[in-house]
Image (spheres, grey):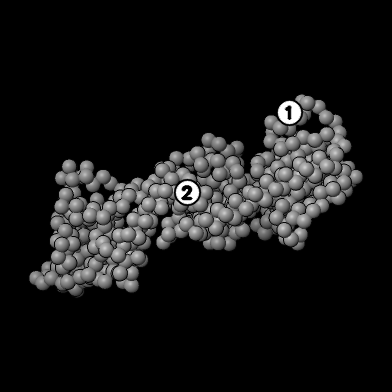
Amino acid sequence: MPATEPSVKLVAIDDTPQSLELIATALEQPGLKIFTTSDPEEGLDIVFEQHPQIVIVDLMMPKMGGIEVLERIVDFDPAIEVVLITAHYSSESAVEAIQKGASDYLNKPVPIAVLRSKIEKLAEDARRRQRALQIDSELAESTKFHGMVGRSPLMWDLYARIKRVARHYRSALITGPTGTGKELVAKALHELSPASSGRFVVCNCSALVETLFESELFGHVRGAFTGATQDKMGLFEFAHGGTLFLDEIGDMPLGTQSKLLRILQNQEVQRVGSLTSRVVDVRVVAATNRDLKQMIGDKTFRDDLYYRLAMVEFCTPGLAERKEDLPLLERHFIRKFAAEFQKDIAGLSHRAQILLARYAWPGNVRELENAIGNACMMAFGDTIDVQDLPESLRAPHAPDTPPELTLAAVAHGEMSLDGRERQSLIDALDRSGGNQSQAARLLRITRDRMRYKMAKYDLK
């Protein structure tokens, strides 16, 4: 591993210069970048700015004790390995340190061989995590299938069925819960079919007024009804040579369903008010999150249309059924939003990963995408932590944090990004009683960065 490109960072905080010199000399090795300081406040700033994998902290220091430093580091990122060292060993302080998240507790003077051994093991563990993160990133790319991400058996089976069917289908039905990517399946079918050079046209049936259904789908001629001042091409004609995706097919009126069935059978469309038919070459993919068989029993959906569409049926699994895909999807969306927001975000903290893994995801992949988008917007550093996640996910688990703005609020213009950042600074300063150092720690930025932001927004 090239020494010029260290992949592991270590911060040593000790008020004794001799101890710092010993640590820096004993642990010097390729691939390990070491920062040292005798000031605990400065040490925390280095931790927040550099985001190291390992921190060595003296237990007894005049400005701030090692336990307090430990607590602040664990609050910042519990994945950081913190090793406490002390010349005043006691079993009580050792137990307290371990309970509060320390990786180890060593008694001074620490034998150089022991120190090297423990740090080398922690550094190798950190490198292993980095390699795993890189592999996840590569897998997220390699397991993409026409916009879908997943390597679970359910997804592999879905990919295989799409590839087998795409060249031959004329109509297909996609079922599954909301937010599972039914439109992505429809696009994959289109892109792999002989109609891929044609248009992929989307019709959201739930958004159409019942009286306009037939005009929108089949078109109309001038004078066909009040307001029809000119001929209009319908979506079937517009999609000629391509694919028409009928989303939320369960919301289609019964009268329109019968006409859709005739088009599927004859490949001919008749504009509203016209006496002649036009031949169309269109593949039709329908999707719904409703139980069409139950609707057939309730006489709200035609059984003959269902069987015509369901000659080829795909079911998109909910996220709860393929939790093994969660890390890949997280990485995929982090990369997407980091690029969109122009932020350097490496990944999730361990406790944020645990929180997301425990969540039920009733909104499936779409809900996960929105949650990661929100977190990428809120994150100040390069790692998404629990407090960056939406309130709906973190409320039962996270400590009290400054009020945060949701992705939807920014998207709808309720507050600009600059406005959100300024308000976060004000909230942190209020909570810390105006202490800039404490406010910077709440926001997980350096004091210099805090002063720059205060000047930028004219905060005194």
What residue type is disc 1 on?
Val
Residue at the image point whose x is 21% and y is 60% from the top? 213
Query: Callout 2: 10 Å neighbours few (<14), some, many (20+)?
Result: some
x and y percentages locating residue 5 in the rendered image: 72, 60
Q: Which residue is mark 2?
A: 325
Q: Whole-Å distance between the Cαs marked 1 and 2?
A: 38 Å
What residue type is disc 2 on?
Asp
Of the pair 207 and 335, the residue shown nearer to us: 335
Q: Secondary structure at mark 2?
A: helix
x and y percentages locating residue 344 in the rendered image: 61, 58
Q: Secondary structure at mark 1?
A: helix
**Is 57 placed left or right of 157 in the picture?**
right
Looking at the image, which residue sits at the far top?
92
Q: Is residue 402 visible?
A: no
In this view, 229 is above or below 4:
below
Q: Earlier in the sequence, mark 1 or mark 2?
A: 1
Q: Which residue is mark 1?
A: 95
Residue at the image point whose x is 55% and y is 53% from the top? 136
**Is 268 placed left or right of 350 in the picture?**
left
